[in-house]
Each structure stands twice: as C-alpha cells, then as structure tokens.
C-alpha cells in the first residue's frame, strides 16, 4: 500500500500509513523505507526524509542498497550533495540505480565535472546508466556547450540502444540547438519519430534563435497538419520568434489559436503574449492582455514594466512597479532594469537614483553590472557627464564594457571628447574585436568634425580585421518580412521605393524638413555622385510600407541599431504628411510618431 500510494502521487497518505505501521509495532523492512523515502522526495518532504534517515540507522538498515539509493535521491533533490555522497560512499554493493541517482542529481544541479567523472567510473565497473542519467548528462553538455562530449554521449546512446528513447531524443536535440549546431539538430530531428511534441518545441526554439520566421511557421503548420496538439511550451516558442522578428500580425494569429485551444489562461503563455505585443509595437494590446489576467506572477509584472519602459512611458512603468509591490510580488533584478531604464528614458534622474539605492536597502538585491550601466545611462542622458564619470570611478565593481559603451554613446550626443576617449580606451581594451566600440568612437570624432581622427579609427578597425555590423531595418507586410540595408537596391520594388522616397523628401521639405548632413560625412563624402548610397534602411522601410499597406494601418518598423537624428526627424515629418502612425523599434527603445511628433519628445 505504501509503495502504491507513493508511486501514484499520494505521498502524504503513504507517510501517514507508514506512521501507523510503525506505531503498531509492525516489523519494518528496507523495502518499506525505500518506498516511504521516495514519497518524501516526490512530495518534497525533505525534513521528514532526514528524520527517516535517522530511523534507518536505528533499525540497522543504513547500508542496505535499496535504502541508500532512496537516500541518495532524496539528498540530491534537496541539493545536499555532501550528505548524498556520504551515503553513496558507504554503499558496499553499488548498483546502477546508486550511480544513476547521484549522477542525475549532480547533473541537474550543475555539478558537471563530478557527474561526468562518476559516469566514467560507472562504465569502468561495468554498470549500465539508464536513460534518465544519459539525458541528464546531455543536459549538462548542452548548458555548458560541451558539444564534443555531448557527441560522445550520443555515440554511447546509439550503442546502448537508447537513441530512440523520447527522453534521450529531447536531450540530444536540446544539446545541438544550445550548441548552435542547427544543421545537426535539423538532421537529427528528421531521423526521429516526429510524434513527440517536445522535439517540435525544441526545433521551434532553434529556428527562433536563428530569427528564421518562415521556417518556424512552416514547422508550426506542419505540426498541426500531422495532428500534433501544441502544448503550453509550444506557444511561447513560436511567440518568441514573432517577438524577435517583430511579426505582429502573425503573433495575433497565434493568439487566436491560443484562445481556440484553451491555453489563454496559462500564465506563461499570457506573459509571452504581453512581451510579443510590446516588442512588436502594440503597447495597448500588452496592456489589455495584462488586465485580462486573473493571476499574475513576477514575470508578468516585469514584462509590463519593461514594456512601458521600452515604449518611453516612464511614469506608467514606475506606477506598475509600485503596484507590483502592493500586489505581493517580489521585485527582482529584472524588475529594476525595467524601472531604471524607464527613469532614464524620461529624465527622472533623482527618482532613478532612489530606486537604485533601494535595491540593496529595501529589497536585499546586490546590483549587477547592468544596473550600474542603467545609472550611467540615466545620468549621461540628462547631460550630467561629470556626475556619471564620478559614479563610474566610485563603483564597487570593475566597470564592464556595457558601462563604458553607455558612457561613450552619451559623449557622442554631448560632444565630450575627453571623456569619450577615456571611455573608448577602456572599451577597446576590454573588447578589441567588437565593431560597436570602433563605430562609436568614429562617430564621436565625426560629429565633432575631427575627420582625421575619424579616419584613423576606421583604419585601425580595418587593420584589426573588425567588420562593422550593417544597419538593417525590417517590416512585416502580408505575413512576410521585408528587410532593408543602407542604400539597398536589391528589393524587387527598389525603383518605385526610391522614386516615392524622392517625392516624400520634396513634400517634407515643403513643410520645413531639412536633411541633416552634419552627422557622419565630410564635405567630400557629401558630394558623392550617388546620394542613395547613404539612404538609411529605416527610410526605405517606411517608404516601402507607405507603398504597400492600406491607409489607416499603423506602420511598424524594426531596426537593429539606434535610429539617427536625421531619420528620426524625417519620420516625424512623414507621419504628418501621410497622416499615419509610424512605430519604430530601434536597439534602445520604441518611437511612436504621429502628426509630426514622437513619443520620446526628442529625448532618446
């Protein structure tokens, strides 16, 4: 009865029955202890399990294999590996279960070296690991990106006849995806039975990492054709792909499917929807989903705070933070990144500093490098560069590249060469191969009209073999993503786009738009015969959208870099000319352009 109750999820009843048995004086056996200890592990009744350990010692069963195996599992699940290994070491007759219990526990808690060491010892002793053990070890290799060791385990699984096991298949696919070996992952996926929803979910994650929207949706549709029912893990995966690609309309279709299949009350899916809508530019839909949720967790609150922060509504972000505390949800490190960023985007300097100081004082959270970077950004955006420099010099941790990059970016805006060069020196020392560092330094010299220094920076970048990340903008039209680069002429409608762009420029000029040539080009470069070479990608994306989308539909453009001041000004004029709402998501935040104005109020 105790074994049956334990196996069927009735851990409390199993423990109660054991207590009755012991009280009546019925003889206890190692098998009974094994069952009741398993019940304690499953029910997370760890303190009771430790009391039972003491009882096994009194009863003289502490060296019995069945009992020790159950104790190893108990302590491993608790994370007390000192006790787990003590019990394991006292075992005279270690069997496969003994090793499997400890190896799985060590692997799941991240003790990869010790787990792999025991695995090798187990093989030497001629004992066979089970599927759970091999899957746990594969998970270790996946998390540490130890692809070579993972492939060795794959070979072992094939030889041992385990490769068709669903747990092993999932772990192997996860290994290749997390190791960024997507080709092997795809090839392996094709060899499986393809009826395991978990495998499909992993592949959706893989294509999401590659930002391959078309492949993700092809896979998702194929999954439905095969009659495989998406679960609570499928939808967040496909929604993440929509989020990364800015595919709002496809995301809305997935939301419809979520409601049809009855998953709209799942909190993790709801959280994914909030993030998807926010990062695709529809903050109103994020808010609506948030208000619909009957149950909210800290991820929900963080998603909404971050959403308001990214869209430049700092006051709403701060209000949500205060409401989060009142609701009983506990703020964490992610929460404060959202709050500090919100304060930075709207210039709430004093409020932001108070929130930063409250992390440790009120919430017991030790600020991480990204929080220090947020404060540097907060001070720098407000033009308080001396204060920002002092803050960096007094930081209790060594400034990381994020801090120096933030400071350098602000030095470009405020044309502070001295501080900018200091930030650039530290940044290049830390990340000599990162193209962004050179580009920022080059831009700083360009806006200050120091062309020789700009050219020297570009030459240094070239000599070191560092390539600049090209600016790219993309937009979703008719369920298809259209991407543009600077001066792009590869689009099938390129001629019409440039023709209409010229018309838009003329109309904008008629109402006061003046192109900013003062940013990054010298006089010789501005006399370039083909001016289209310098047309930024967001201008092309907006122009294409105006040609392609019906009147009244908001235009949503995504960009991988920060939008420049000229493009920002140009889009303000275009929103007025076209009477359209234009939403641009750049690398820093969202800009909502409407009737000639931007939600950022030119503070970004």
Image (cartoon, rainbow, N blue to C red):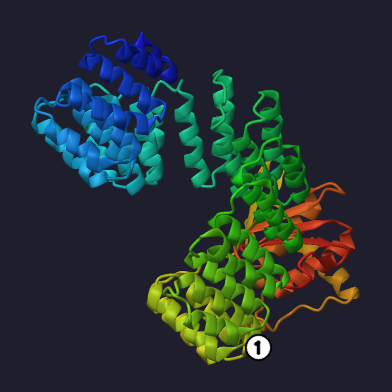
* Vertical relation: 570 (above or below) 157: below
* Vertical relation: 349 (above or below) 30: below
Identified at 57% across, 75% down, the residue is 376
Q: Position of residue 243 (x, y in %)?
A: 62, 46
Q: Position of residue 520 (x, y in %)?
A: 62, 81
Front one among 554 and 8: 8
Q: Position of residue 208 (x, y in %)?
A: 53, 43
Q: Position of residue 493 (x, y in %)?
A: 71, 53
Front one among 237 and 14: 14
Is residue 320 visible from the viewing direction of this image?
yes
Q: How many marks?
A: 1
Q: Quadrant of the C terminus?
A: bottom right
Identified at 54% across, 57% down, the residue is 333
Identified at 67% across, 59% down, the residue is 310
* Vertical relation: 260 (above or below) 589: above
Is residue 504 visible from the viewing direction of this image?
no
Does 340 sit left or right of 459 as displayed?
Answer: right
Q: Residue furthest front?
A: 24
Q: Image quarter for residue 230?
A: top right
Q: Residues within 10 Å of mark 1 (few under 14, many from 20)?
A: few
Q: Image quarter for residue 261?
A: top right
- Disc 1 target residue: 523
Does 80 sit left or right of 563 as displayed?
Answer: left
* Vertical relation: 561 (above or below) 206: below
Q: Image quarter for residue 212?
A: top right
Front one among 267 and 174: 267
Front one among 187 and 270: 270
Does 164 sit left or right of 525 as displayed?
Answer: left
Q: Quadrant of the N terminus?
A: top left
């Amino acid at each position: 009865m105790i074994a049956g109750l334990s196996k069927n999820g009735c851990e409390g009843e199993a423990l109660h029955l054991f207590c009755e048995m012991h009280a009546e004086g019925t003889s206890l056996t190692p098998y009974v202890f094994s069952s009741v200890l398993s019940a304690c592990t499953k029910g997370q009744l760890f303190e009771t399990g430790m009391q039972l350990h003491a009882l096994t010692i009194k009863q003289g069963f502490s060296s019995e294999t069945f009992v020790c195996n159950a104790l190893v599992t108990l302590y491993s699940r608790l994370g007390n590996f000192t006790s787990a290994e003590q019990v394991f070491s006292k075992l005279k007759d270690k069997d496969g279960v003994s090793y499997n219990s400890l190896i799985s526990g060590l692997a799941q808690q991240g003790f990869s070296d010790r787990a792999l060491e025991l695995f090798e010892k187990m093989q030497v002793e001629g004992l066979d690991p089970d599927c759970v053990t091999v899957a746990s070890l594969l998970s270790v290799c996946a998390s540490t990106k130890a692809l070579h060791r993972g492939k060795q385990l794959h070979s072992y699984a094939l030889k041992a006849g385990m490769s068709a096991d669903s747990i092993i298949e999932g772990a192997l696919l996860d290994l290749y995806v997390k190791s960024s070996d997507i080709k092997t992952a795809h090839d392996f996926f094709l060899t499986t039975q393809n009826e395991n929803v978990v495998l499909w979910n992993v592949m959706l994650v893989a294509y999401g990492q590659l930002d391959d929207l078309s492949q993700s949706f092809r896979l998702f549709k194929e999954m439905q054709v095969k009659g495989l029912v998406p679960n609570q893990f499928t939808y967040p995966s496909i929604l993440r792909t929509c989020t990364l690609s800015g595919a709002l309309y496809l995301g809305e279709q997935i939301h419809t499917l979520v409601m049809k299949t009855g998953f709209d009350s799942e909190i993790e899916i709801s959280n994914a929807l909030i993030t998807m809508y926010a990062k695709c530019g529809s903050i109103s839909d994020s808010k609506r989903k948030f208000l619909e949720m009957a149950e909210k967790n800290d991820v929900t609150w963080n998603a909404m705070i971050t959403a308001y922060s990214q869209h430049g509504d700092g006051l709403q972000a701060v209000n949500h933070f205060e409401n989060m505390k009142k609701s009983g949800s506990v703020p964490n490190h992610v929460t404060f990144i959202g709050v500090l960023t919100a304060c930075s985007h709207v210039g709430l300097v004093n409020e932001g500093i108070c929130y930063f100081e409250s992390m440790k004082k009120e919430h017991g959270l030790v600020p991480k490098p990204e929080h220090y970077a947020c404060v540097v950004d907060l001070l720098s955006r407000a033009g308080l560069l001396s204060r920002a420099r002092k803050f960096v010099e007094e930081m209790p941790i060594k400034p990381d590249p994020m801090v120096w990059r933030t400071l350098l970016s602000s030095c470009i805006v405020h044309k502070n060469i001295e501080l900018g060069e200091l930030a650039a020196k530290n940044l290049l020392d830390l990340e000599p191969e990162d193209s962004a560092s050179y580009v920022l330094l080059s831009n700083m010299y360009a806006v200050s009209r120091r062309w020789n220094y700009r050219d020297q920076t570009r030459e240094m970048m070239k000599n070191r073999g560092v390539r600049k990340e090209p600016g790219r903008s993309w937009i979703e039209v008719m369920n298809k993503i259209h991407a543009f680069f600077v001066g792009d002429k590869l689009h099938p409608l390129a001629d019409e786009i440039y023709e209409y762009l010229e018309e838009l420029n003329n109309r904008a000029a008629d109402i006061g738009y003046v192109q900013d040539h003062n940013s990054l080009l010298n006089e010789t470069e501005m006399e370039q015969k083909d001016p289209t070479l310098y047309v930024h990608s967001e201008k092309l994306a907006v122009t294409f959208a105006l040609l392609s989308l019906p009147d009244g539909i908001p235009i949503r453009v995504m960009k991988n870099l920060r939008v420049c001041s000229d493009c920002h000004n140009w889009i303000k004029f275009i929103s007025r000319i076209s009477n359209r709402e234009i939403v641009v998501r750049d690398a820093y935040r969202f800009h909502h352009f409407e009737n000639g104005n931007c939600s950022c109020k030119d503070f970004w």
